[in-house]
Image (tube, helix red, strand yellow):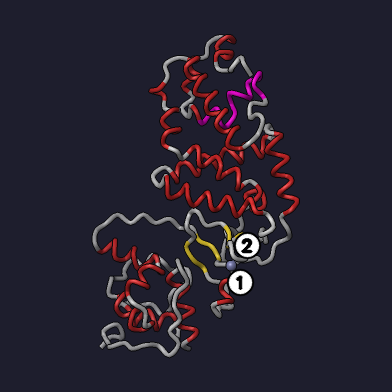
Amino acid sequence: MEPWEAPVRLLPLPLPPVHGEVFGWYLHRLAAANQVTAGQLAKTLTPFKNAEVGKRTDTLWRWTPMVLPRLAILTGLTPETLRMLLPAIARIEARTAGDVVRYRRRLYVACSHCMHRRGITGPVLAHRPADLQLCRRHGIWVDGNRHYRVGHLPELVAAQHRHRRIAHRFPDTLEAGTKEAQHLVRSWLLNKNQPHLLSRWNNRLAQIPPKEAVYGNIIRRRVDEREYIATYPEFVTLLGMVADPAWRARRAPRRWVNLSQHRRTIDAAYAEAEHRLNVPTLREKLRSHAFSNDALFRWTDSLGRSLMLVTTPDDYDALRDESH
Ligand SMILES: [Zn+2]
């Protein structure tokens, strides 16, 4: 009889998975606690020919839903609990049911202080919900390989709270909006054309303390991790606008046919962003060509259609609001 056909029973130390934990990672923790190998555990779950299972293994293409009832017996947890905690289970089931499985690998190392409370001393690799950036209980930024302490910057905690609300409110446009809002803040950070935002960001950068833990062998470092943290509140503010279907509809080319109509769209978008970000102006370079190259200007017209209509210097004026 193959190991995956033999009866299974409760392990001596049946550790539960951490929420969102990568399957291979969990199997390794469970195996180590019970002094077996992850490969041996895998063989008791499902037809599995290899000697070892990778810690980062999570796709499990050849695995079947029989993993779930057997893992439930091994761990003493209900199938519902395992399904809720381990994203790989839901994926195996969806794939078996013939559903399209959308797989986004957004991994993070769980807050070490939270893990300590559960008696886990080593790092835990898990899937990160799109709106989880920091551990609110411990004030630690967990989205990245350096877990910066940011608890003294309350605007980051507040921003994550808003981020969560936006994610629930605009699920269909969240992914596109995230890319766009990230582009807006990155562009303004790098081109230094927005002095109000820049001073805010530099202020915050100066307050981000040295790293606490580095998980370089688990998570790849983002080159601009500190800048990413410093600009996060403004990113969330802009996300609330650009992910909003009402604002997305306003910029659609169908809504305007000439430059002065488009100018009203541009004015409205800038006025809204200035209001939400609480800055006196985002239109610093209004009189120069840099304005029509500004990231928010581009957002109102991603196809560059308005610039195709520009044929004379006067046309540029039509894109600028004379009252500013
Ligand atoms: Zn924590």
Are there few (<14), some (14-19), or many (20+) residues within 10 Å of tag 1?
some
- At horizontal 32% and vertical 74% (from top left) the residue drawn is 79
Q: Indicate which disc, 2 or 1, sits on the residue closer to the N terminus.
A: 1
Which dot marks residue 161? none
Q: Amino acid at mark 2?
A: Ile
Which dot marks residue 140? 2
Q: In this image, 40 relative to 95: left or right? A: right
Q: In this image, 120 relative to 168: left or right? A: right
Q: Amino acid at mark 1?
A: His
Q: Tell me where residue 181 appears, x and y as whole percent.
A: 54, 40
Above or below — where is 130 with respect to 137? above
Residue 211, quarter of the rendered image: bottom right
- At horizontal 47% and vertical 17% (from top left) the residue drawn is 261
Q: Quadrant of the C terminus?
A: top right
Q: In this image, 160 relative to 250: left or right? A: right
> Circles 2 and 1: CB distance less than 8 Å?
yes
Determine if the C-beta at disc 2 is less than 8 A from ligand 1: yes
| Quadrant observed for ligand 1 in the rendered image | bottom right
Q: Quadrant of the N terminus?
A: bottom left
Per the image, is 292 magenta?
yes
Above or below — where is 104 with respect to 28? above
Q: Tell me where residue 37 appears, x and y as whole percent.
A: 45, 84
The foreground one among 291 and 266 is: 266
* Magenta segment: 285-299
Above or below — where is 266 with respect to 192? above
Q: Tell me where residue 25 appears, x and y as whole percent.
A: 47, 73
Above or below — where is 168 with respect to 70? above
Determine if the C-beta at disc 1 is less than 8 A from ligand 1: yes
Q: Report the residue marked by disc 1.
A: 113
Q: Tell me where residue 289 appears, x and y as whole percent.
A: 63, 21
Residue 276, quarter of the rendered image: top right
